Image (spheres, rainbow, N blue to C red):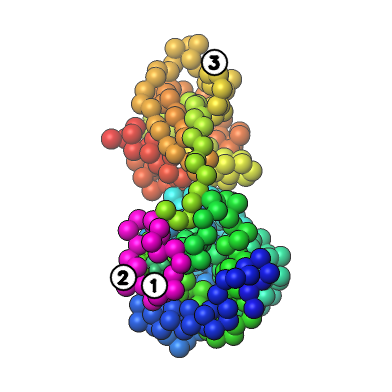
Amino acid sequence: MPPASLAGKPGGAHINNFRKSLLAWYDKNRRAMPWRALPGRRPDPYHVWLSEVMLQQTVVTAVISYFFKFVEKWPTVHDLAAAPVDNVMAAWAGLGYYARARNLHKCAKEISARDGVFPDSIEELKKLPGIGDYTSAAITAIAFDKPATVIDGNVERVVARYFNITEPLPAAKKTIRQYADFLSSGRGDRPGDFAQAMMDLGATVCIPQSPRCGMCPLQQNCAGKNIAETLPRRVPRIEKPLRRGHIYWIMDGKGKILLQKRPERGLLGGMNGFPTSEWVEKGRPGHPDFIKRLIKNKKSQKNRVVAHSFTHFDLILQGWIVETASIQCGEEGFFWRRSDDLDRTAFPTVFKKFARLMID
Ligand code: SF4
């Protein structure tokens, strides 16, 4: 029976039909992914975990090359656990949300210490670093074929449309979860395939614009198909705040550029970058003290501007060229690198953009 709050909505027979139609569609239309097992085989939990952590906040197309790189460098969770964390961070550069990479490495160590065996329940998985509600459910269903409600953006869209949920997001998340739970919980048939089928349907048929209802296995009973493009509704987005700051191209006069390993905590934590000022939303950004001295001595000039958009804010950094050999390596994570080695240095995207601007 549906939960009380879903009274009046489809009953068990309808839902069984939903699952049957969807799974039959999936058998013919499943997306091939490098981390997915061939039909009839069980996937490697290491591959499922790695891909699901990479897919947090990142689209499939961006993840595929990183997934290949990681499994080539570190074929097992023991190999990943034994790698220096700096190598893992460098391999992750460009994928964003760098706390994920640090947690990935911590989690690999914990799994390696358990003889490489991943837990197979949501509760136990959630005790591991970097594994939250979504990832624990995805690993439970996909790697271990156990019932779990997996809700990503694609699933949210399919459920909101199929059940014609017109309440706007984010408030509608609770209702969507109730329906999604009802579709997946306690129904033993192919839970892993069901979770992936929902995602694949949302990614390839029930797409955000111009959904392909004519080829959808759920079209017969879909309550929202006439207004599908308007669902799920959302409260209007608030414009992102703009932060400003300075970024410095500091040369030693002998072909080297000053870089800085950023502090472990905070945005882009533990990653290599160019020295910057603080990034502020209000007022004018100031220069760090060591730059102020150089500016006073007229050893600097304004140069290019780099713009970058993070999830929660936009950023504009004023570039400066500074010449000095007086900065000590080691202090505040500073180190020098030859300018012709910069294109082989692993940077987050904002610093990669700055390096390209300065080199081109
Ligand atoms: S019929 Fe259309 S709106 Fe309904 S689930 Fe299928 S693609 Fe989405």
What residue occupies the far front of the structure in this picture?
8
Could you tell me if the residues under marks 2 and 1 are in contact, i.e. CB atoms within 8 Å?
A: yes
Magenta-colored span: 208-229
Name the residue tied to disc 1: 219
Name the residue tied to disc 3: 293
The answer to whether residue 5 of the structure is visible from this angle is: yes
Q: Quadrant of residue 355?
A: top left
Going from N to C along the chain, the mark reached first, 2 or 3, is 2
Q: Position of residue 235 (x, y in %)?
A: 52, 44
* Numbered label attached to residue 119: none
Going from N to C along the chain, the mark reached first, 3 or 1, is 1
What is the secondary structure assignment of the residue under circle 1?
Answer: helix
Considering the image in quadrants, where does the C terminus appear?
Answer: top left
* Numbered label attached to residue 214: 2
Q: Of tags 2 and 3, which is closer to the observer?
A: 2
Q: Which residue is at a point 40% across and 64% down the rendered structure image? A: 225
